[in-house]
Image (tube, grey):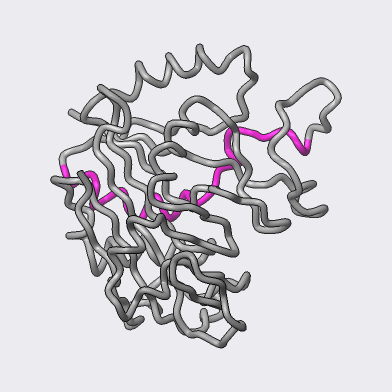
């Protein structure tokens, strides 16, 4: 039976949170303070993955485990790449359920890269769809931008607020400058499914919103309202636009998002 493997980025340590994330993960060494060394349990967005998993399991997969995106010493990169190729074979599914940090130069809200062989393969694939994918800004590729309907051409690139709702701040057409920031009540979320990301390798599913809360809500909406979007026979790029409301204080479930308005400006099959 084909397997699902979660590709998991590391969460910041307490030291990182206190001083701000300003560089990439260091490969742990003897001089590194213990609290800064990444640990196996310090993974991002596990609950968002749990929202997606039941629908994916109904598609005929079984769960195969987590691929932890630790920083990789150059001397180990080739060996770990070979190990990844032996685990992740044709027919399996690799799931990345948070934002891929493409052009992620923001001073805050940064996801640190590992520069592992496996992460490099994901960047090669996802870089075809995004010219930039930071917490503060997302820019689609020129080819995808040209597929947007005329009334959504100004979603080719967008800047986002850094609060939990991650609403648009600025919108622009591909290749044009942003105007002045405005007050928007909408945000964007994305999903990419690409078959066989290297020859004989796994398929890739990447689904994300622009903040931690929106990332979780988007996974919840895919499970509860749009499970058909997670049925794959061909590659797919999906862009959603969500009209958000204020997040309630300490909600007991995610059902507060059940009435949120969702539109799909772009849904295209991939070769």
Residue 174 horizontal side relative to residue 134, left or right: left
Q: Position of residue 266 (x, y in %)?
A: 28, 66
Q: Which residue occupies 24% across, 62% down?
A: 267
Residue 126 sits in quarter = top left
Residue 241 horizontal side relative to residue 110, left or right: left
Residue 71 lies, with reference to residue 136, above or below; the image says above
Q: Quadrant of the C terminus?
A: top left
Q: Position of residue 142 (x, y in %)?
A: 39, 57
Depth check: give the residue in front, 266 or 46. 266
Q: Position of residue 80 (x, y in %)?
A: 50, 17
Q: Residue furthest front?
A: 175
Q: How many marks?
A: 0
Q: Residue furthest bottom?
A: 183
Q: Which residue occupies 64% across, 20% down?
A: 73
Say whether residue 37 is magenta.
yes
Q: Which residue occupies 17% across, 48% down?
A: 232
Q: Which residue occupies 71% across, 45% down?
A: 13
Residue 37 lies, with reference to residue 131, above or below; the image says above
Depth check: give the residue in front, 61 or 127. 127
Q: Position of residue 212 (x, y in %)?
A: 53, 61
Q: Quadrant of the N terminus?
A: top left
Q: Which residues are magenta?
A: 35-59
Residue 265 lies, with reference to residue 77, above or below; the image says below
Residue 63 lies, with reference to residue 82, above or below; the image says below
Say whether residue 2 is magenta.
no
């Amino acid at each position: 039976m084909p397997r699902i493997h979660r590709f998991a980025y590391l969460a910041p340590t307490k030291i990182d949170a206190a001083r701000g994330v300003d560089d990439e993960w260091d490969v742990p060494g003897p001089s590194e303070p213990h609290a800064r060394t990444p640990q196996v349990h310090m993974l991002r967005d596990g609950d968002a993955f749990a929202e997606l998993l039941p629908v994916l399991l109904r598609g005929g997969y079984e769960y195969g485990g987590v691929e932890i995106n630790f920083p990789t010493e150059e001397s180990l990169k080739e060996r770990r790449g070979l190990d990844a190729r032996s685990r992740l074979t044709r027919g399996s599914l690799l799931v990345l359920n948070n934002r891929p940090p493409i052009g992620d130069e923001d001073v805050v809200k940064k996801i640190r890269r590992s520069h592992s062989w496996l992460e490099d393969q994901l960047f090669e694939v996802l870089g075809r769809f995004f010219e930039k994918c930071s917490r503060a800004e997302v820019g689609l590729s020129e080819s995808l931008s040209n597929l947007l309907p005329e009334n959504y051409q100004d979603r080719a690139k967008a800047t986002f607020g850094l609060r939990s709702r991650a609403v648009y701040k600025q919108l622009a057409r591909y290749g044009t400058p942003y105007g002045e920031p405005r007050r928007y009540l909408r945000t964007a979320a994305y999903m990419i499914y690409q078959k066989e990301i290297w020859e004989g390798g796994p398929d890739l599913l990447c689904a994300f919103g622009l903040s931690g809360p929106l990332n979780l809500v988007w996974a919840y909406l895919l499970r509860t309202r749009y499970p058909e979007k997670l049925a794959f026979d061909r590659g797919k790029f999906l862009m959603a636009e969500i009209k958000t409301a204020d997040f309630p204080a300490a909600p007991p479930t995610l059902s507060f998002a059940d009435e949120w308005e969702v539109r799909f400006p772009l849904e295209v099959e991939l070769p």
